[in-house]
């Protein structure tokens, strides 16, 4: 039975452009399906997670990561009596705004766009699903429900107001990313409140998925070994349990068995803590969840601190590993070359982008935003190909 604070698709706040109700699918199911069929979702196949896309077939891409996040989100939402379709939709769309080369590309674009309203991948996801996907006859974007858009905008919590915190928050006197402000002025997402419980689940599913698969990918890349993980919380006990139950197990099976236990610890912890917090909150509606003043979906304090130790280890041994840093410098240069090349000569943009260039006219900021949309939409592979084609590598 759905909990009273679960989002009910029949009571959705609706879409920016009203549409007839589907005969066979709920509003949130339609959101999920539109996301899966979007061009931006397909491009995630060739966008990096940590490693550049072409470095190996076994490493996670943004697409495989998004699928893993959606799986976790459905599991947790179902266990908590929440709407699984909404949690899944938010999870599948949460990384649509990432540019090529992961956070490296985002950092480069953030600097380049500083004079033109900045760059934020959550805000860019909103721009993609409300404007840049141009396939429908009646509207730009995917015309998703208010609830799904809210989940994307508030992936890291409230964006505005006293409850806002973290790198995506807009502090006192700060400037909201233009891509978010532009849409929010037309379709208020109540950016000073927390998101629904389903969207909070999707955000924590993101943490669960990348904590798990970054360990797996780092091992595969040889950036650290299983022996290194024996000294860490959560991972060490997981390997010890596998060794007790399966002495002499094949190394690859041992790795998989241990890391699936790490995965299980995180999911079970989130569910147990959320059940207690939700039961104690007394919420009787989805709106009650938004106005409780604190998140309902979170790790226990103990596990949070343990995962903080693991993240510190990954930061040092993986995200800042010499080989990864060399690649970061190389792909940063690619973005730093491409962006000004298109700004200097917008005719380099494809023919189907020239209408946007013409609309920008002599407005440098408007042109920069067109160029950003094009560059941010590139896959790793395409960005490297364009950089070479334009002779920018000299």
Image (cartoon, grey):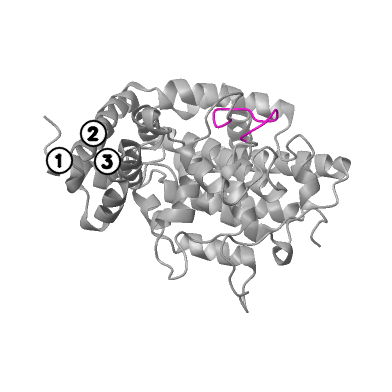
Q: In front: 218, or 38?
A: 38
Element at label 1: helix
Q: Residue at x 35, y 34 (%)?
A: 105
Q: Which mark is residue 340?
A: 2
Q: Is residue 69 above or below residue 84?
A: above
Left or right position of 280 against 217: right
**Quadrant placement of the C terminus:** top left
Element at label 3: loop
Residue 117 locus on image (x, y percent): 43, 33
Residue 311 locus on image (x, y percent): 54, 26
Q: Identify the residue under disc 1.
A: 388
Q: Residue at x 56, y 59 (%)?
A: 144
**Circle 3 crowding by C-alpha within 10 Å: few under 14, some 14–19, many from 20:** few
Residue 192 locus on image (x, y percent): 67, 37
Q: In front: 86, or 250?
A: 86
Q: Please, what is the dominant secondary structure of the magenta stretch?
A: loop
Residue 276 occupies quadrant:
top right
Q: Is residue 58 visible?
A: yes
Give me the C-alpha separation between circle 2 and circle 3. 16 Å
Q: Is residue 176 above or below residue 347?
A: above
Name the mark nearer the viewer: 1 or 3: 3
Residue 355 locus on image (x, y percent): 28, 55
Q: Earlier in the sequence, mark 1 or mark 3?
A: 3
Q: Identify the residue under disc 3.
A: 362
**Circle 1 crowding by C-alpha within 10 Å: few under 14, some 14–19, many from 20:** few
Does the magenta portion include 190?
Answer: no
């Amino acid at each position: 039975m759905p909990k009273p604070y679960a989002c009910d698709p029949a009571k959705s706040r609706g879409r920016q452009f009203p549409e007839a109700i589907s005969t066979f699918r709920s509003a949130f199911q339609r959101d999920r399906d539109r996301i899966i069929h979007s061009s931006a979702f397909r491009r995630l196949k060739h966008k990096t997670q940590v490693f550049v896309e072409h470095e190996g077939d076994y490493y996670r891409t943004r697409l495989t990561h998004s699928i893993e996040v959606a799986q976790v989100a459905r599991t947790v939402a179902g266990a908590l009596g929440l709407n699984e379709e909404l949690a899944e939709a938010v999870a599948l769309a949460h990384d649509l705004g990432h540019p090529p080369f992961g956070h490296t590309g985002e950092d480069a674009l953030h600097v380049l766009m500083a004079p033109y309203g900045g760059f934020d991948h959550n805000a860019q996801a909103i721009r993609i699903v409300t404007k840049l996907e141009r396939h429908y006859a009646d509207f730009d974007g995917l015309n998703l429900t208010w609830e799904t858009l809210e989940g994307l905008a508030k992936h890291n919590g409230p964006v505005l107001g006293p409850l806002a915190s973290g790198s995506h928050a807009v502090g006192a006197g700060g400037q909201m990313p233009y891509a978010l402000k532009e849409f929010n002025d037309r379709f208020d997402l109540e950016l000073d409140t927390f998101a629904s419980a389903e969207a909070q689940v999707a955000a924590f599913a993101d943490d669960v998925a990348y904590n798990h698969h970054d360990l797996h990918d780092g091992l595969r890349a040889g950036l650290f070994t299983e022996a290194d993980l024996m000294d860490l919380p959560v991972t060490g006990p997981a390997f010890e349990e596998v060794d007790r139950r399966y002495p002499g197990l094949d190394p690859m099976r041992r790795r998989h068995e241990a890391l699936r236990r790490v995965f299980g610890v995180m999911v079970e912890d989130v569910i147990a803590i959320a059940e207690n917090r939700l039961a104690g909150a007394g919420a009787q509606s989805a709106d009650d969840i938004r106005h409780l003043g604190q998140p309902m979906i979170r790790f226990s304090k103990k596990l949070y601190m343990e995962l903080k130790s693991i993240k510190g280890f990954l930061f040092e041994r993986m995200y800042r590993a010499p080989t990864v840093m060399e690649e970061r410098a190389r792909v940063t240069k690619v973005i730093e070359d491409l962006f000004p090349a298109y700004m200097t000569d917008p005719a380099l943009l494809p023919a189907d982008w020239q209408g946007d260039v013409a609309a920008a006219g002599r407005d440098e900021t408007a042109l920069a935003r067109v160029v950003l949309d094009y560059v941010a939409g590139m896959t790793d592979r395409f960005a490297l190909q364009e950089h070479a084609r334009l002779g920018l590598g000299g």
